[in-house]
Amino acid sequence: MSFLRNGYVTAPLLGALWFLTISSTVAVTMSFATGDAFRPSVILSLFWGVLAGLAVIHGRTVAKIFGVGVGAIGYLGFGPMLSGDVLLLAAIIGHGAAAGFGVLGLLVILDSVVKGPLSRHEFEAAVIRFLTGFGYIFFTAIVLIPFYVMVMTSLKNQSELLQNPLDFSLDLSKGFGLLRSYQELFQDFNFGTYLINSFGISVVTVLVTLAFSVLGAYAVARLRFKGRAAFSRSILLIYMVPMIVLALPIYIAFSMTGLRNSLFGIVLIYPVTTIPVALYMLQGYFRGLPAEIEEAGLMDGLSRLAVIWKITLPLALPALASVSLYVFMIAWNEFLLAFMLLDDPSKFTLTRGIASLNSSEIPRQHLMAGAVIATVPIMAMFLGLERFMTKGLTAGSVKG
Amino acid sequence: MSVSSLPPSGTTPLARREARLAWGLLAPTIISVALVVILPLLAIFWISVKPIGLADLRPTAPIVRESLRGSGEDMRIEYRLRNSSQEQAIGNVVLEDDLPAQIEFLGDLPEECAVQGSVLRCEFGTIEGGFRTRLKFPVAAQNKDEAEELVEASAPRVSGDADNILTNLTFTAENFARIFDGEEFWEVLGVTIFYTVFGTIGAIVVGLFAALLLNKSFKGQGILRGLYLFPYVAPIIAVAFSWLILFDPFSGSANALLVQMGVTDEAINFFGERPLALIMVTVFEIWRYFPLSFLFILARMQSIDTDMYEAADMDGASPFQKFWYLSLPQLLGILSVLFLLRFIWTFNKFDDIFLLTGGNAGTRTLTVNVYEQAFAISNIGAGAAVAVVIFCCLLGFSFFFFKFISQEEGL
């Protein structure tokens, strides 16, 4: 492996890999943005990447001149990325981006690489910088692409997409006409009701879960009783039971008692699926609170319940926020039970409503618009309260 | 007076009161969990040895329809009685109906029936499965429409004792014989193991990589961290359908992109071909759950003492050496916990595969098989039998869980 640790080997190698990464990324981005034919050329990417690596170790100025050159050559049709019959502006932006990001990225990556032999540190630092750059691009792409497709599909109509599945460009002259599928969902498919149902169910689930789990968590965290350890272990076991195993008997029981097809039935079940998680998260937090304040409260003549209400809960507000958010997310996203237990379109939750849009008679943009409607509120909440969320998720070894 | 130097032993009244309070506070949780989790789990065992189909959920009962037919001379009340089940017999079937005073019976009553006051009562005894009969009572009335209204104003009451398949004592081993029969079960098990093992390892490795990326503070770190959690936070149904549309063989962007890049000439049916479909659902699982491992690993990384790295720097350790000899051993604990937890949850996963492929094209895992047996083939008993198999596997896993996790987490 030591022959790799030489500027004349490391630089071309990383250059080639980096150019391949960049040309693929730019080609995919440009295709998704314009729908035009951009594609990376593996061989040309590797070739220009090798040269770029060598240029970079010969100094920044050389590298920049080289970059401009690659951009121009790309436009002529021999660069790392090839473009078919595309608009002039798109071509300039595309080839410019491919060459620019390629060379500028390499300048950063190969910062410590010099001509000739490299120390282990210099070599590994360069590799790590390459991996970091690659990682950011990779993760951002895999996370964003499905959501991008979701949003854009909801705004286009089916025939446009069938013609060119890559063309996500929007016809902005349509104005609010772009939102037609959303309008139809709310007008003809009852999505307003579903939104309210989902929201109501989630809020009730959060409240019931908190009411039950705060008491339980306090008992487990603070009170001494026989079987405390066994209890806090077995509450974790509930995590392990798959929903589908429970759903079957619940379906049978609900069918026989007439609770199927009622939101009340759903509200009976949802909190129980979240109580164990919430209890586990909260008891961890309660343990971290100083017991002395509570003892002072007890000495002053408060009852245990009053202590919980007046001392523990106010101190545990951040934990309550994370738990509520998390439980809200579970209830909002829950699909299986809603799917099995609700058949009546007037009582659907959002997830059940979206499932009903999955038919060949309903155009795809409606399905995706439904997906966006379900995703946006939870994302907005999540981004706004991200700190609570990450804390809460990690605090409770949370279920997935 | 001798004073004991030991603390008082045994339970003091104070301790007993505390324990009582604790159980009181836990009671709502315990009761609800017992009702919604423990009870269904026991029920699964019971159902798994019952010969029960989806149609048996509607209890067997006699069903009656009443109508006024004909006109003038020929006018008659008709009761059509049938057994809702084709197989089950119903005992003590009794039909009762109030007779309007304005309507007069003509002719004899059938032998089962008698009129007491204004109530018509017919006793059928036991009726067999698939039984149906039609009782005709010639009547006379002035006005047909009026009579029809009168007749239909009082709904006939019918009762009978039917055996409920869920509560009777008929048992069968056929459900288990059926699911273990043939190669299908082993295929399902193989798919489950592939999905679980690769899904778990993949999600942890990808999560580890993401955590390494974000384990430094820079501007925008918070935004990226939030962004990388998206797949986990978004509703499963939304992301599953987005993937389906993205990878659609006819109009999917992924295929268009691959064709344009010259990777493939023909559209690939990502979720419809063996063994590609199984790989795709595993990739989806990794994509959706890497954020979770990422979050846990990142949290653990940020709590590692930096002194150690400074010491390593002094000793001239290279970045990879630091990762391999310092970070990884520190992360081993959380990684093994994550592996165990994710292994169990991936094993339990149902929604993802159900939405992506419906268990077709060689992607049917055990959990999907529960649904398939119970609802697609309408054999609830067989579905429950698969659920029992799952439950037994989980018992094995939870044994490991307690053996290892309890030490790691210090529970």
Image (cartoon, coloured by chain):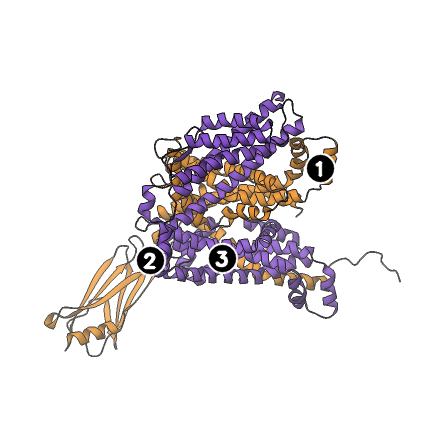
Chain that appears orange: B
What's the amino acid at mark 1?
Answer: Tyr
Classify B12 as above or below A243.
below
| Chain of the residue where label 2 is placed in the rendered structure | B
Residue denoted by label 1: B309
- Asked if labels 3 and 2 touch by Cβ distance under 8 angstroms, the answer is no
Answer with the quarter of the image where residue B16 lies. Answer: bottom right
Horizontal side of B337 relative to A374 (left or right) equals right
- Nearer the observer, A259 or A180: A180
Mark closer to the observer (3, 1): 1
What's the amino acid at mark 3?
Answer: Tyr
**Which residue is depicted at the point 67% across and 38% down?**
B330
Callouts 3 and 1 on one subunit: no
Per the model, the C-alpha gap separating discs 3 and 1 is: 46 Å
Residue denoted by label 2: B60
Per the model, the C-alpha gap separating discs 2 and 1 is: 73 Å
- Element on which disc 1 rests: helix
- Asked if labels 1 and 2 touch by Cβ distance under 8 angstroms, the answer is no
Answer with the quarter of the image where residue A9 lies. Answer: top right
Residue denoted by label 3: A270
What's the amino acid at mark 2?
Answer: Thr
- Element on which disc 2 rests: loop
- Element on which disc 3 rests: helix
- Nearer the observer, B265 or A171: A171
Chain that appears purple: A
| Chain of the residue where label 3 is placed in the rendered structure | A
Per the model, the C-alpha gap separating discs 2 and 3 is: 31 Å
Mark 2 is surrounded, within 10 Å at the Cα level, by few (under 14), some (14 to 19) or many (20 or more) other residues, namely: many
